[in-house]
């Protein structure tokens, strides 16, 4: 039993994801650039062509977002962005000529908040700023990339899933480090609380962290596919995932508390589940590494600690799995069979090791796992500048 293989339930849990869905453009047909800039631009052939392309591109993006087509949404967002950026630059260079015949009001329902109907989607929020439109189009590409990562993970294509989540993280990094500071420098008059979380630097910084965590989850699954498992590396990777999920919570609470309170309750439960699970997996893998090195008592203490984190927590502030996993009304409930399988695996492995320690090795079992024997997190997914920045 000491060389028991990693159970498939562990791999499925390690790659468990929240299903990301794109936001939407509200009342897309009521806004047309051609009408709004009729006097200022429709008599110039090149400008008129740009305005018509903007109208068509916005409708295409709105249609793909509404249909839930992540691949189409990403492609349409990337086609729309150069057009809306050209219009924005033109208005910045020649502000006196940008006289509107009809007021522009960009209305979007964000993808990540849950203060709208049903508690799973955000409210419709509007702004007259072109930078708002640009921001939400960029954010749509990020969330669509995350949705594509979920789809690839479900197919078992962990390499493609890693790429998709990394791109989502790169886009969020672009938003919080380059794009949104530019909006502020241009004199934004919109209060961050009036906008979706995708339009806040703290929100984008937080989601960069959790998308990086998802990419690393996929890397863990890929590492477990081989015949030989590197337990020490797997422990460090899982600890790194846990730290990045914790970074998501820390950043959002400190830099976007208003938006943190708007997140769907189901998403916050998922975050709590991942924090406990990845902590448990890091201890599980390091216990396997310790056992292989002949540190039998320490390995058993680490395994006991890993198993305790798989139990339902006593309260919302206690370590452990959220109690919602046992409720049929919770989205987490679908993970319960795999969670029970992993619990049984840990129990059987611990019983086997305990017999060996008591009858063969006679190694002392520490009461608690020393801090020096807990895995140090490694964050292997690096953020690069977004190719479409």
Image: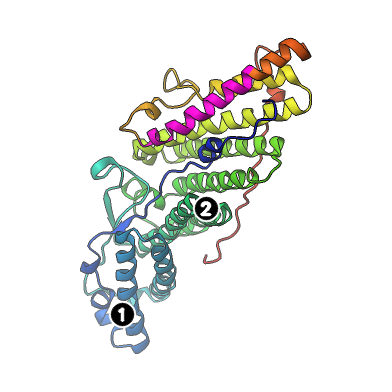
Q: Label for residue 351?
A: none
Magenta highlight on residue 2: no
**What segment is highlighted magenta in the picture?**
331-351
Count of marks, rendered view: 2
Q: Give 277 or 109, whichever is nearer the viewer.
A: 277
Mark 1 or 2: in front is 2
| Residue 291 image-quadrant placement | top right
Task: Give the Cα separation between the discs numbered 1 and 2.
Answer: 33 Å
Magenta highlight on residue 343: yes
On the image, the x and y values in percent for residue 110 come to 34, 52
On the image, the x and y values in percent for residue 153 come to 50, 50
On the image, the x and y values in percent for residue 223 come to 65, 45
Circle 1 crowding by C-alpha within 10 Å: few under 14, some 14–19, many from 20: some
Residue occupying the point 48% across, 30% down: 339
Q: Give 128 or 34, whichever is nearer the viewer.
A: 34
On the image, the x and y values in percent for residue 87 come to 38, 74
Q: Label for residue 52?
A: 1
Residue occupying the point 50% across, 29% down: 341
Which of the two discs, 1 and 2, labels the residue nearer the N terminus?
1
Q: Quadrant of the N terminus?
A: top right
């Amino acid at each position: 039993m000491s060389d028991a293989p990693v159970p498939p339930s562990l791999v499925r849990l390690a790659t468990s994801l929240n299903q990301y869905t794109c936001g939407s453009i509200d009342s897309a047909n009521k806004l047309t650039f051609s009408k709004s800039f009729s006097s200022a631009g429709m008599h110039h052939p090149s400008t008129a062509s740009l305005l018509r392309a903007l109208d068509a591109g916005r409708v295409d993006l709105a249609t793909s977002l509404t249909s839930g087509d992540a691949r189409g949404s990403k492609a349409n967002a990337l086609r729309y962005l150069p057009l809306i950026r050209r219009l924005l630059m033109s208005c910045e260079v020649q502000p006196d000529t940008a006289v509107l015949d009809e007021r522009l009001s960009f209305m979007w329902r964000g993808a990540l908040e849950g203060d709208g109907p049903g508690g799973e989607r955000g409210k419709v929020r509007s702004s007259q700023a072109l930078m708002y439109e640009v921001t939400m189009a960029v954010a749509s590409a990020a969330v669509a990339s995350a949705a594509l990562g979920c789809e690839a993970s479900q197919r078992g294509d962990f390499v493609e899933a890693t790429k998709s989540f990394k791109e989502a993280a790169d886009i969020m990094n672009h938003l919080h480090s380059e794009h949104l500071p530019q909006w502020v420098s241009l004199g934004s008059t919109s209060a961050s609380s009036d906008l979706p979380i995708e339009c806040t630097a703290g929100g984008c910084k937080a989601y960069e962290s959790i998308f990086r965590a998802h990419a690393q989850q996929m890397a863990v699954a890929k590492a477990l596919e081989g015949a030989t498992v590197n337990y020490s590396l797997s422990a460090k990777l899982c600890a790194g995932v846990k730290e990045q999920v914790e970074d998501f919570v820390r950043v959002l609470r400190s830099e976007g508390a208003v938006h943190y309170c708007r997140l769907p309750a189901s998403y916050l439960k998922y975050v709590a589940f991942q924090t406990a699970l990845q902590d448990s997996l890091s201890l599980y893998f390091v216990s396997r590494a310790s056992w292989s090195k002949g540190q039998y008592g320490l390995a058993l203490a680490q395994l006991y600690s890993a198993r305790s984190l798989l139990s339902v927590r006593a309260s919302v502030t206690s370590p452990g799995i959220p109690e919602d996993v046992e409720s049929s009304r919770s989205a987490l409930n679908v993970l319960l069979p795999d969670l029970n399988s992993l619990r049984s695996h840990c129990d059987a492995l611990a019983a086997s090791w305990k017999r060996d320690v008591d009858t063969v090795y006679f190694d002392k079992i520490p009461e608690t796992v020393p801090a020096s024997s807990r895995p140090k997190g490694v964050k292997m997914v690096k953020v690069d500048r977004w190719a479409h920045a």
